Amino acid sequence: MPEASWATSGATRKSMQANRSRDTKPELRLRKALYAMGLRYRVCTRPLPDVRRTVDIVFRRAKVAVEIRGCFWHGCPQHYRAPSSNSGYWSEKVQRNMRRDADTAARLAEAGWTLTVVWEHDDLDVAAEAIAEQVKRRPDRSG
């Protein structure tokens, strides 16, 4: 393990390196369900060109953005539990993520977008149905 690493052990470091920032299992399952419904979307793209943040799934014409959030990384109100080791680091990391998520949601709303948040523990088939309804309710808004 490199000296500059914040990981508490080699096993922790290896585990953290295996975490994916995109194409997670819940994301792939949700995208597959949406595609099966005939919906087409952009993946891991910026809905707002001036903001350097990507959203997991974007329906550009309908102005609907979907974020699939992991309970640990985004501080799920139901399931987040701070780890016992290096808790100060992780608490601050998750708080930063939550502040960024709130800022992104505010920017999208200000620009006329609908943001749907799907947590990794949510029923993805139910989420796909709800997203499909949102996309259908917001036909081409490109203007």
Image (tube, rainbow, N blue to C red):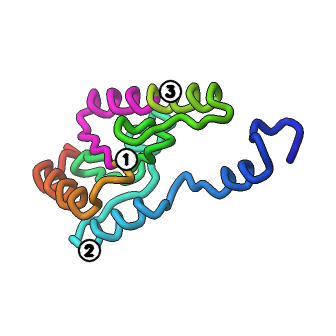
Q: Is 38 displayed left or right of 25 in the figure?
A: left
- SS state under label 2: helix
- Foreground residue, 39 or 30? 30
What x and y, as percent, mark residue 89? Answer: 65, 28
Count of labels shown?
3
- Image quadrant in which you'd find residue 85: top right
Mark 1 lies on residue: 67
For numbered disc 3, what is the local secondary structure?
Answer: helix
Neighbour tally class for label 2: few under 14, some 14-19, many 20 plus, Cα within 10 Å: few
* Mark identifier at residue 95: 3
Q: Residue at x 24, y 56 (%)?
A: 127
The amino acid on which the numbered mark 3 sits, given as a three-letter code, is: Gln
Which residue is at a point 42% across and 33% down the rendered structure image?
A: 101
Give the mark nearer the N terminus: 3 vs 1.
1
Residue placed under numbered mark 2 in the picture = 36
How far apart marks 1 and 2 lie (CA) works out to 19 Å
Between discs 2 and 3, the one toward the N terminus: 2
Q: Residue placed at 27% from the left, 31% from the top? A: 109
Circle nearer the viewer, 2 or 3: 3
Picture residue at 52% right of the left edge, 27% below the top: 96
Q: Nearer the viewer, residue 118 or 36?
A: 118
Residue 128 figure quarter: bottom left
Residue interval drawn in magenta: 100-118
